[in-house]
Image (spheres, rainbow, N blue to C red):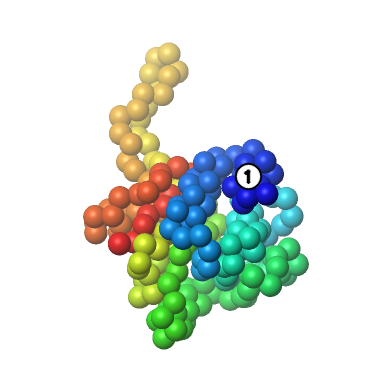
Amino acid sequence: MHFLETFDSAWAMRLGPRRHTFRQLFEFLLARKAQGHFILETGCAREADNWEGDGQSTIMFDRFAREHGGEVVTVDLDETACAYARSAVSPCTTVHHGDSVGFLHGMAGQLLRAGRAIDLLYLDSFDLDPSNPAPSALHHLKELCAIAPALGDSTLVVVDDAYHQLRGFRNERDEFVLLEDQGIAGKARFVAEYFAQVGIRPLFDGYQCGWVVP
C-alpha cells in the first residue's frame, strides 16, 4: 500500500485537527523527491496510540522513511518518552535524549560538514501552556535559530500547536464578535513572526503551520 493510502486509511481520522496539515506535509515531501528524505524532529512520540493528543509524528515519520528510503532523527528531554519512541520505531529512526536547542546546534555543524540537506524540520518539543504560551513559543524560535545554518534548499519547517489568536467580544445575544485575527500564535508565534519579517509566507496554516525555506 502506498504511504498516503496508509495515512488516509489508518491514521487520518485519528489525528483530529492535525489531519489535513500532516497530509500536506507528506504531499510536499513526496512532490519534492521520491525517496531519501532526511527528517529532523524535536519532541518524540510519548505514548502508544495518543494520536489526537500528540499526533504520533515519530511513528508516521518512521513509516515514511521505511517506505521511501529516508532517515529520521528525533530528540526529546524526557527519557521515558525516548524509551517509548525507541521501542516503536525501526532502524530508520534514531532517538536522542537531551536538550533540543543544544542538540540542534551540534547537528547543524555536522550536517554542514557532511553537505546534507534537511527535508523536514518538525518542531514540537516544549509543551504549550495556553495561559502562558511565551516560554514554549520562545523555545521553538531558539530551536530554529540553532539549526538555521543547516536549513535551505526548500527545507519545510513545521511547528505544531499553532492556533490563531483572536480578539473580540460577546454581544447581547451571547455571540462572539470577531474584531481581529491577530495571527499565528501558540508554539509557532515567534517562528511565524520571524518568517513574516523575512517575507516567507506559510505553505499551510492550520493547527500546524509550515514554511518552506527558500
Name the amino acid, label 1: Glu
Residue shown at 62% from the left, 41% from the top: 8
Residue shown at 67% from the left, 41% from the top: 9
Residue 37 in sight from this viewpoint = yes
Q: Position of residue 43 (x, y in %)?
A: 57, 63
Q: Position of residue 60 (x, y in %)?
A: 63, 56
Q: Position of residue 134 (x, y in %)?
A: 42, 56
| Mark 1 crowdedness (10 Å alpha carbons): few <14, some 14-19, many ≥20 | few
Q: Quadrant of residue 98?
A: bottom right
Which residue ends up furthest to the top in the rendered image? 173
Judge whether 50 appears above or below 83 on screen.
above
Q: Nearer the viewer, residue 99 or 83?
A: 83
Judge whether 57 appears above or below 80 on screen.
above
Count the marks: how many? 1
Residue 80 in sight from this viewpoint = no
Does residue 84 appear left or right of residue 101 in this picture? right
Q: Which residue is mark 1?
A: 5
Please state, as top left, top right, bottom left or bottom right, where the C terminus lies in the image.
bottom left
Q: Nearer the viewer, residue 50 or 90?
A: 90
Q: Quadrant of residue 73?
A: bottom right
Q: Quadrant of residue 18?
A: top right
Q: Tag 1, which secondary structure?
A: helix
Residue shown at 53% from the left, 64% from the top: 35
Residue shown at 68% from the left, 69% from the top: 82
